[in-house]
Amino acid sequence: MTNRQALLDRIQALEDDAERYRWLRDRSANQYEHPLVVSQTRTEHGMRYIGPLTGRSLDAAVDAARSNT
């Protein structure tokens, strides 16, 4: 396999991953009745509920979670 073909294969894999994420984010289930991501965290004042996360708010949550790893 040439370097060019390896690069093209990698680009295709990245595009497939991006499309899979967009499908999960935008079209999986009925995200308004069954949100894809909901966060519940304990605070000094009790539980804090964040959700549903969709579109840009979900993108931001994924980016924040990835930056913490």
Image (tube, rainbow, N blue to C red):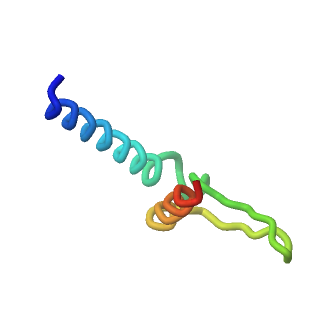
The residue sitting at 36% across, 47% down in the picture is 18
- Front residue of 68/21: it is 68
The residue sitting at 24% across, 32% down in the picture is 9
How far across and how far down the image is residue 34, in percent? 61, 52
How far across and how far down the image is residue 24, in percent? 46, 47
Relative to 40, residue 12 above or below: above
Determine whether, in the image, residue 27 is placed left or right of residue 6. right
How far across and how far down the image is residue 54, in percent? 50, 61
- Front residue of 49/16: it is 16
Relative to 60, residue 18 above or below: above
- Front residue of 60/65: it is 65
The residue sitting at 85% across, 75% down in the picture is 44
| Quarter containing the N terminus | top left
How far across and how far down the image is residue 28, in percent? 48, 46
Determine whether, in the image, residue 54 is placed left or right of residue 4. right
Q: Quadrant of residue 5?
A: top left
- Front residue of 18/51: it is 18
> Which residue is at the far top?
1
The residue sitting at 59% across, 59% down in the picture is 68
